Image (cartoon, grey):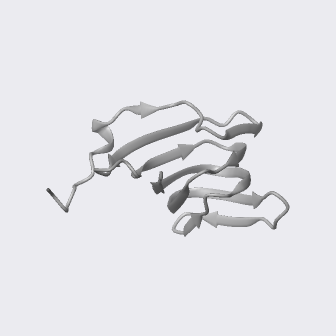
Amino acid sequence: MSTISKLKNIKDVDLITDNLEGWTVTEGSPVMKTWILHTNNDETMISGYWESTPGSYHATYKEYEFVHLLEGRIIITPDGGDPVEVKSGDTFVVENDFSGTWQIIETVRKYFDVKLK
């Protein structure tokens, strides 16, 4: 059993262009792209890249997500909460009970790790 896994190259994986489950466009016409670069052995974690053009989504999370924002700027506002602005270079987490708005101000690309189970 290998304990080290090199992630696939973005050029070697399928591009997913469907909106993520639980994400609904609320403003504009944002377009998202997702690349899954790795799924761990017991299929409880995925890693990859996600991009979106400007616009807004209402997102409901069921899984915990670690994010490193590589490009762009987002204002994330939890339902009933205060907005948080994140920009290129920021690292943050989204808990599995998050529900709120992602306003994509500038086209974004993020690296993510999601805990599925």
Q: Residue at x 75, y 36 (%)?
A: 28
**In the displayed structure, does residue 2 sit left or right of residue 81?**
left
* Coordinates of residue 61 in the picture (x, y in percent): 63, 51
User: Height in image: 36 above or below 113?
Assistant: above
Number of numbered discs: 0
**In the displayed structure, does residue 81 sit left or right of residue 8?**
right
Q: Residue at x 58, y 56 (%)?
A: 72
**In the displayed structure, does residue 66 sit left or right of residue 39?**
right
Q: Residue at x 55, y 63 (%)?
A: 88
Residue that protrudes farthest toward the right in the picture: 80
Residue that protrudes farthest toward the left in the picture: 1
* Coordinates of residue 25 in the picture (x, y in percent): 73, 37
* Coordinates of residue 34 in the picture (x, y in percent): 47, 40
**In the displayed structure, does residue 40 sit left or right of residue 30?**
left
Q: 88 or 77: which is nearer to us?
A: 77
User: Height in image: 32 above or below 8?
Assistant: above
Q: Quadrant of the N terminus?
A: bottom left
Q: To which quarter of the image does residue 90 belong?
A: bottom right
User: Height in image: 36 above or below 97?
Assistant: above
Q: To which quarter of the image does residue 32 belong?
A: top right
Q: 99 or 13: which is nearer to us?
A: 99
* Coordinates of residue 43 in the picture (x, y in percent): 36, 47
